[in-house]
């Protein structure tokens, strides 16, 4: 790899294209840690938002009006407010109320910026996932549900073993789009100093004055990251497709 690093150093000396993340070990480490943080942040938010969507779609069919109203207003709040405002609300609003005091009397937050980013972005994407899964549940034929009930399945078992597996297949294309948007939205974590890829890149271009180069690197990295997610989701969609359900 040293030959490759030396080539990028030569490229900078001859053309002025300053990609320090390749020939400078310190910058390379900073960018790699930012990329890894983006991957971890995206993975955590994807898993949590999908779980929120599954639970929310189930609770929307609750017999209790209070439960249905809670889910309804949760969806309205997170779908109709900007995700950056939500991030600030959790980090600066709720976060300042959740503090602890050490023996010296100094206060520190109970929840860090990374955790708040995961919570906020998961709730944001989860609100859309609830509606995505709800549309999938409603697309399952009523006769299928009646058949499960006639076999003695409870409402929960009918949802988990019959309705949701079919609804998931129907919802997968829309879910794919929402998860792609979620990965791109993780860049907002920059606003509360989460050391993800955009944040670390800004540190590098502030030190090295190579803004155009880092902007292009960021574009390529996100293109590859999102492309991998789309490829995996499309392969998964084809693998679990059931004839007669979904497109």
Image (spheres, grey):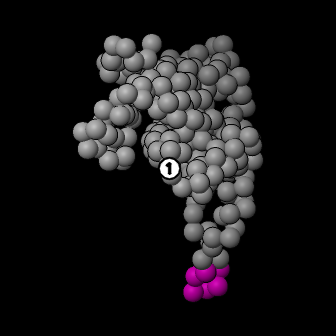
Q: Is residue 206 visible?
A: yes
Q: Nearer the viewer, residue 53 or 110?
A: 53
Quadrant in which the N terminus appears: top left
Residue at position x 61%, y 86% in the image: 104
Q: Is residue 62 left or right of residue 117?
A: left
Q: Where 240 sits versus 57, above or below?
A: above
Q: Position of residue 96 (x, y in %)?
A: 70, 67
- Magenta part of the protein: which range? 101-106
Q: Is residue 102 magenta?
A: yes
Q: Is residue 90 left or right of residue 55?
A: right
Q: Nearer the viewer, residue 229 or 244?
A: 244
Crowd rating for badge 1 (residues with CA inside 10 Å; few <14, some 14–19, many 20+): few
Q: Is residue 67 magenta?
A: no
Q: Is residue 25 visible?
A: no
Q: Nearer the viewer, residue 203 or 106?
A: 106
Q: Position of residue 223 (x, y in %)?
A: 55, 20
Q: Position of residue 244 (x, y in %)?
A: 37, 14
């Amino acid at each position: 790899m040293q030959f490759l690093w030396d080539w990028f150093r030569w490229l900078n000396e001859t053309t002025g294209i300053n990609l320090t993340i390749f020939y400078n070990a310190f910058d390379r480490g900073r960018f790699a840690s930012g990329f890894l943080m983006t991957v971890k942040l995206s993975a955590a938010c994807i898993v949590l938002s999908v779980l929120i969507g599954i639970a929310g779609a189930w609770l929307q069919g609750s017999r209790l009006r209070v439960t249905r109203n809670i889910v309804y207003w949760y969806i309205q709040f997170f779908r109709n407010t900007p995700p950056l405002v939500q991030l600030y609300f959790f980090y600066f609003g709720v976060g300042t109320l959740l503090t602890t005091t050490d023996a010296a009397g100094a206060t520190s937050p109970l929840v860090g910026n990374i955790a708040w980013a995961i919570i906020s972005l998961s709730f944001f994407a989860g609100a859309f996932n609830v509606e995505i899964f709800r549309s999938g549940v409603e697309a399952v034929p009523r006769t299928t549900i009646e058949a499960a009930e006639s076999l003695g399945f409870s409402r929960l078992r009918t949802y988990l073993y019959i309705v949701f597996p079919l609804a998931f297949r129907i919802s997968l294309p829309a879910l794919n789009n929402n998860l792609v948007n979620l990965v791109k939205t993780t860049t907002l974590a920059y606003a509360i100093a989460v050391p993800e890829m955009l944040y670390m890149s800004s540190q590098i271009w502030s030190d090295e004055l190579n803004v155009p180069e880092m902007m292009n690197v960021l574009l390529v990295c996100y293109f590859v990251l999102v492309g991998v997610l789309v490829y995996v989701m499309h392969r998964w969609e084809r693998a679990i497709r059931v004839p007669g359900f979904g497109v």
